[in-house]
């Protein structure tokens, strides 16, 4: 029974079954009846199996109705750029548009590795602000400063230097248009960039001939541009034409064809055409294995992407095997401590959690943490993020002591490298509050009321600290709302703070449910849950914070409101509380209509 509490304590990768509304009403009715009979006593017999069952049922009711949303604030994946700054979600990496007939693998990689940022499936308070599917972050690259650098860095395909390279007015224009198109693209002047890439294609056809590999390069550049603009159908046709030219010019198993197939596979992947993406990746993998060798990191990269599309098609065992093999290749190449390898291990552990193989996930998460401890130390947010994820898995395995030690260490480390009022500090405090509540609910049979009161007071203190931090962020956001230099990045921080605040307020409600079984009805102070409900309502009613209840946070908001309403509804003591309940119900109806 206690294990079911994990469905609320742990994030969404741990499946949580739903509880029918009729069963929920029976549970609530049973709880109300038990409270009436217990009102005359000063404490509740926590050693009673029946009392323990009632308490767990009540706590688990809300946990079974929802799982944690994942808040992807980019906290683990990017380096810290100075004290007080939170790592951002990955800035769109810029592609290297080719300016010769070669196909550099890096030139075929996407700008949008924000789509490529692996969704952190386990962090309880890291909400995905993007709906894209995840690719490897290592697929993003920095731009070459010049076309010569791009040529010098080409590794995937060989230069075309057979003595037949044409140099004329059109080829010169082709190179100039390509370079300028890349520069305009990097400046986000997309209309100008598109015209230049289109002009470069025309000049390539005029200068080299319609079926020359240089034309395939120009087609690839334009396809890359459209893919990054999410105009996938246009990009797909251009990629296919480029591949057709390459297959005519070279053998069908030439490495240039393999690299183009890799790029087309990514285009299909982004369109959720997983079967087509799988075919492209498999062909590319076969070519790369023959040319580069099965121990090459690029071979491992394609293998990893193939693993991801297999996973998305429900072929998890095959996906896990390929991911492990890609990790092994990197380790044998001396890249076991690289961000690429760490990311793949994290992806594998997340997939294992989804398959409910927590013990195996724990092994990989320990390996990640050990690697980061050695390479970065505990002053790195990468390390604290890895420890945070491992802590959540340990909670699922009822290893509470080590889980708490890791969270406490994370808290100390983050306070050292971040301001105390940072939302990443508040995240850890909410984790600690849930862990404390989890320990309390799991050990009800053996603790007395004094010990239980200590547990709940500690959990509430963590919640109060988290509420104070996130509330401070939102207050400052209200003051700064009219400033012209407000950025989307700051908005992400505010939205994150909003979601964390809601999680903390919700835990306050869960603590109150537990407290009713510890204190006599007349001794319990309801002001905290009343204050939490007022905060939750005002968050939506105030214009400067209502905008922060975005689509991703809305689910969090509604569940927080329902938990608090459930607690207040049982009290039924003051007219003011009934007015709050009425306003809360009205908000839920409004949000339901919007959805």
Image (cartoon, rainbow, N blue to C red):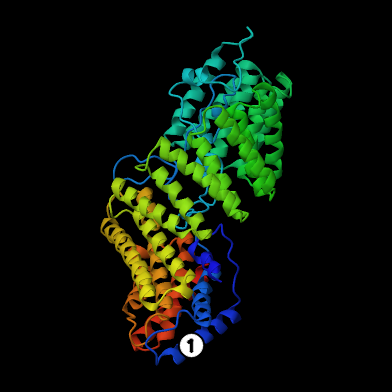
Place of residue 19 in the rendered image (x, y in percent of width and height, measured from the top left): 59, 74
Query: Looking at the image, can residue 114 be seen?
Result: no
Identified at 43% across, 48% down, the residue is: 385
Residue 497 x %, y %: 37, 58
- In the image, is 335 to the left or to the right of 516? right
Badge 1 crowding class, 10 Å Cα cut-off, few under 14, some 14 to 19, many 20 or more, is: some
Residue most extreme to the front: 446
Residue 62 visible in the current orientation: yes
Q: Quadrant of residue 278?
A: top right
Q: Position of residue 360 (x, y in %)?
A: 59, 49
Q: Which x, y percent locates residue 472? A: 28, 60
| Residue at screen point 42% across, 69% down | 506
* Closest to the observer, 370 or 309: 370
Dot 1: element: helix
Q: Dot 1 corresponds to which residue?
A: 34
Residue at the spot x=41%, y=57% of the render?
A: 404
Give the tally of numbered discs: 1
């Amino acid at each position: 029974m206690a294990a079911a509490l994990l469905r609320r304590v742990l994030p969404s990768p741990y499946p949580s079954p739903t509880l029918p509304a009729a069963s929920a009403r029976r549970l609530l009715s049973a709880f109300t009846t038990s409270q009436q009979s217990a009102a005359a006593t000063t404490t509740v017999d926590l050693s009673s199996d029946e009392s323990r069952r009632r308490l767990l049922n009540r706590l688990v009711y809300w946990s079974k109705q929802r799982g944690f949303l994942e808040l992807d604030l980019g906290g683990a994946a990017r380096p810290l750029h100075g004290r007080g700054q939170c790592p951002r979600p990955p800035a769109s990496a810029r592609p290297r548009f080719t300016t010769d007939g070669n196909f550099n693998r890096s030139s075929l990689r996407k700008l949008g590795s924000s789509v490529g940022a692996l969704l952190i499936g386990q962090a309880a308070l890291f909400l995905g602000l993007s709906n894209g599917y995840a690719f490897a972050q290592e697929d993003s690259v920095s731009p070459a400063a010049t076309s010569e650098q791009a040529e010098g860095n080409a590794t995937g395909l060989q230069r075309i230097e057979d003595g037949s390279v044409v140099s004329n007015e059109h080829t010169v224009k082709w190179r100039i248009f390509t370079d300028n198109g890349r520069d305009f693209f990097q400046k986000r002047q997309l209309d100008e960039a598109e015209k230049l890439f289109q002009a470069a294609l025309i000049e390539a056809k005029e200068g080299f001939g319609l079926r020359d590999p240089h034309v395939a390069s120009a087609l690839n550049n334009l396809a890359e541009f459209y893919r990054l603009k999410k105009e996938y159908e246009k990009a797909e046709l251009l990629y296919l034409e480029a591949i057709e030219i390459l297959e005519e010019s070279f053998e069908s198993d030439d490495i240039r064809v393999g690299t183009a197939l890799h790029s087309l596979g990514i285009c299909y992947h982004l369109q959720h055409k997983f079967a087509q993406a799988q075919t492209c990746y498999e062909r590319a993998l076969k070519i790369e294995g023959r040319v580069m060798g099965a121990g090459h990191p690029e071979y491992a990269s394609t293998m990893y992407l193939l693993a991801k599309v297999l996973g998305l098609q429900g072929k998890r065992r095959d996906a896990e095997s390929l991911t492990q093999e890609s990790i092994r290749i990197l380790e044998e190449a001396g890249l076991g401590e690289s961000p690429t390898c760490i990311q793949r291990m994290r992806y594998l552990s997340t997939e294992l959690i989804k398959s409910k193989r927590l013990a195996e996930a724990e092994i990989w998460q320990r390996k990640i943490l050990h690697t980061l401890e050695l390479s970065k130390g505990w002053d790195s947010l990468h390390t604290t993020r890895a420890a945070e994820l491992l802590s959540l898995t340990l909670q699922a395995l009822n290893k509470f002591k080590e889980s708490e030690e890791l969270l406490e260490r994370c808290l100390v480390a983050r306070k050292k490298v971040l301001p105390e009022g940072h939302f990443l500090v508040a995240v850890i405090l909410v984790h600690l509050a849930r862990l404390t509540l989890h320990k309390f609910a799991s050990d009800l049979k053996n603790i007395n009321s004094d010990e239980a009161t200590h547990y709940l007071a500690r959990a509430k203190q963590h919640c109060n600290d988290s509420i104070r931090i996130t509330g401070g962020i939102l207050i400052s956001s209200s003051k700064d709302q009219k400033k012209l230099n407000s950025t989307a990045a700051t908005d992400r921080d505010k939205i994150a703070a909003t979601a964390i605040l809601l999680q903390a307020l919700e835990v306050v409600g869960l603590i109150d449910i537990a407290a009713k079984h510890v204190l006599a009805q007349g001794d319990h102070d309801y002001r905290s849950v009343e204050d939490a409900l007022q905060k939750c309502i005002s968050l939506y009613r105030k214009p400067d914070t209502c905008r922060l209840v975005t689509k991703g946070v809305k689910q969090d908001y509604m569940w927080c409101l329902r938990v608090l309403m459930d607690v207040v509804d049982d009290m039924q003591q003051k007219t003011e509380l009934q007015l709050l309940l009425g306003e809360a119900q009205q908000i839920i109806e409004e949000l339901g209509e919007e959805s």
